[in-house]
Amino acid sequence: MIIKKGLLVFFVLLFGFRIQAQKFEELALTPPLGWNSWNKFACNINEEIIRDIADAMVESGMKDAGYEYIVIDDCWHGGRDSLGFIYPDFTRFPNGMKALADYVHSKGLKLGIYSDAGTKTCGGYPGSRGYEYQDALQYAKWGIDYLKYDWCNTENINPVGAYTTMRDALYKAGRPVLFSMCEWGNNEPWKWAADIAHMWRTTGDIFICWDCKHQHEGGWYSWGVMKILDMQEGLRKYAGPGHWNDPDMLEVGNGLTVNEDRAHFSMWAMLAAPLIAGNDLRNMSEETIEILTNEEVIAIDQDSLGVQGFKYSSKDSLETWFKPLKNGEWAVCFLNRRAEPAVVEFDWKNENVMDEIFGYVTKFDEVTYSIRNLWNRKNIGKTKKAFIATVPSHDVVMLRLKPLK
């Protein structure tokens, strides 16, 4: 009997440890909001830029709108010391990462950093393969809050094992870190990563265009906004609080038209995607600030129900999207992918929309909803009458429906 009790204690301890060897569960209950350096600066980053970006996030109103992460992407690395611990490039970051994290934290924000599951990062800097636990300890010492973990130089590595190792290393280090997998969707991470990461990339890199495919010198591709949107088909059932599909960072403010920026931002909100800005926050137009800080659109992305939206219908490149929200509310987005304006006519009572995966139903024939236009910020009537509007080229009309008692 003593032996059996001893075995029982052993297995309780063993499996109890395994249960705890997970990601930090309290993070990313809604999609993360923040900024990443890559889309605008690539490798041209330094300590001064990151400090200025943190200042700008506060001064622009983005922090008040919910943004909190400042993420340094590739090329910050210096090398490894004699014990294998990573250190930054001190010409770019002369005061070190701890001082930078302290500054970002002083603004009420959080600092993120980048590494890679392979031997080298995509930019050719030291990767974390074989150094996962050391790197996690270093990040904790510096005060890092977010890790973007890439997938370059990973020949003959199993992605589940590689990302699980870093997950466990972060957990063992003891500091809560949001874990962002950047595996590009090659190994269908949505099917296995919910217990490993808080978010995972579903595609290759985004590119600053509406609907194009861009080939790079190395033979790999980046994708326009609409191309990436189409790649999300069939993935929504895998997303939810604490585990999000990531269609890559935002290109708002980087060269698309204002219409395209607004559509891009709206559709990422409908996807319940992480909203990670990638522009120069120090130099934004009023239109860019207005898009990035539209709290009513952000609220669609951040809805606590955590259900990703879905395409309800498509005709002549005019798409209708629905997203269930808490308290029986719905977000509706009419997306015009055409080069010309499009007229939408939507007779609510004839369109009982059903979310076939999660079971939410509009019941427009029984329930009347109030309608609010989220970009005009106006209440525009009820669903008793058909909705008619013109959607400009490469733009959206985005609505929030609230059931009336």
Image: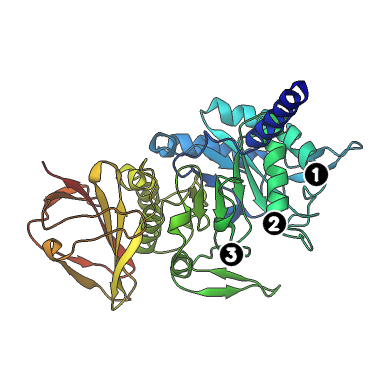
Residue picked out by circle 3: 204
Tell whether 297 sits left or right of 276.
left
| Amino acid type for the residue under numbered disc 1 | Gly
Among numbered discs 3 and 1, the one appearing first in the sequence? 1
Residue picked out by circle 1: 78
Among numbered discs 1 and 2, the one appearing first in the sequence? 1
Q: Could you tell me residue 97's position as x and y percent? A: 70, 34
| Amino acid type for the residue under numbered disc 3 | Gly
Among numbered discs 3 and 2, the one appearing first in the sequence? 2
Q: Could you tell me residue 64's position as x and y percent? A: 40, 34
Residue picked out by circle 2: 159
User: Looking at the image, is 72 positioned above or below residue 229?
Assistant: above
Query: How far apart in space, not on screen, are marks 3 and 2 (Cα)?
Result: 16 Å
Tell whether 246 sits left or right of 149.
left
User: Quarter of the image holding residue 86?
Assistant: top right
Q: Quadrant of the N terminus?
A: top right
Query: At x 46% / y 45%, what residue is drawn?
Result: 31
**Is disc 3 surrounded by few (<14), some (14 to 19) or many (20+) residues within 10 Å?**
some
**Considering the numbered disc 3 on the image, is that residue within a helix, a strand or a loop?**
loop
Tell whether 172 sits left or right of 111.
right
Residue furthest to the left: 385
**Considering the numbered disc 2 on the image, is that residue within a helix, a strand or a loop?**
helix
Q: Quadrant of the C terminus?
A: top left
User: Looking at the image, is 338 positioned above or below residue 108?
Assistant: below
Residue furthest to the right: 82
